[in-house]
Amino acid sequence: MRKLPGQEKLERFMRGRYGHDELNRVFSALALALCFVSLIIRWPPLSSLSMALVIICVFRSFSKNTGARVREANYYFSLKSKLIRFFGGAAENVRQRMTHRIFTCPSCGQRCKVPKGKGRVRITCKHCGAQFIKKA
């Protein structure tokens, strides 16, 4: 396969450097969004922030300190997974509340789910076995 002119030079330059990863893609998208917003509302600090994000993105791509870049990426992934768990659980709770009532066990605090529209029901906690009566 034929290489483009200058491709070999670029490959030699990038050898040992970190390159582009998901965190850089997030920074790039955020910088682009901030740039568009700053054009609309004409607030100079936003364009400065978008330029700073572009500079950080370029710095991370050309960095030879791959250990530090990997730590940054791992920190980003841990934050991302926490946010996904938090907001994913919140969305699931909203969906469940449309069809079910959720009660808290008075003895152990475990959440118990009962279908709506069943009237007064006796609920047995699956965790501790306590029974209590509530209106569903």
Image (tube, grey):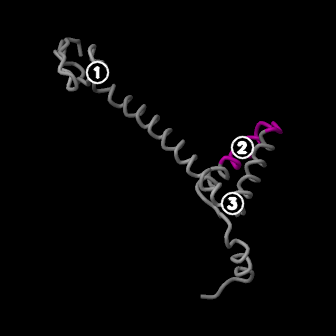
Using the image, determine if residue 11 lies above or below residue 62.
below
CB within 8 Å, label 1 to label 2: no
Circle 3: residue type: Asn
Circle 2: residue type: Leu
Q: Residue at x 44, y 38 (%)?
A: 85
Residue position marked by numbered label 2 in the rendering: 34
Residue 13 relative to residue 68: left or right:
right
Residue 88 relative to residue 110: left or right:
right
Residue position marked by numbered label 3 in the rendering: 65
Circle 1: residue type: Arg
N-terminal label among 2 and 3: 2
Give the extent of the magenta segment.
30-45
N-terminal label among 3 and 1: 3
Residue position marked by numbered label 1 in the rendering: 101
CB within 8 Å, label 2 to label 3: no
Q: Going by the picture, which residue comes out furthest to the bottom? A: 2
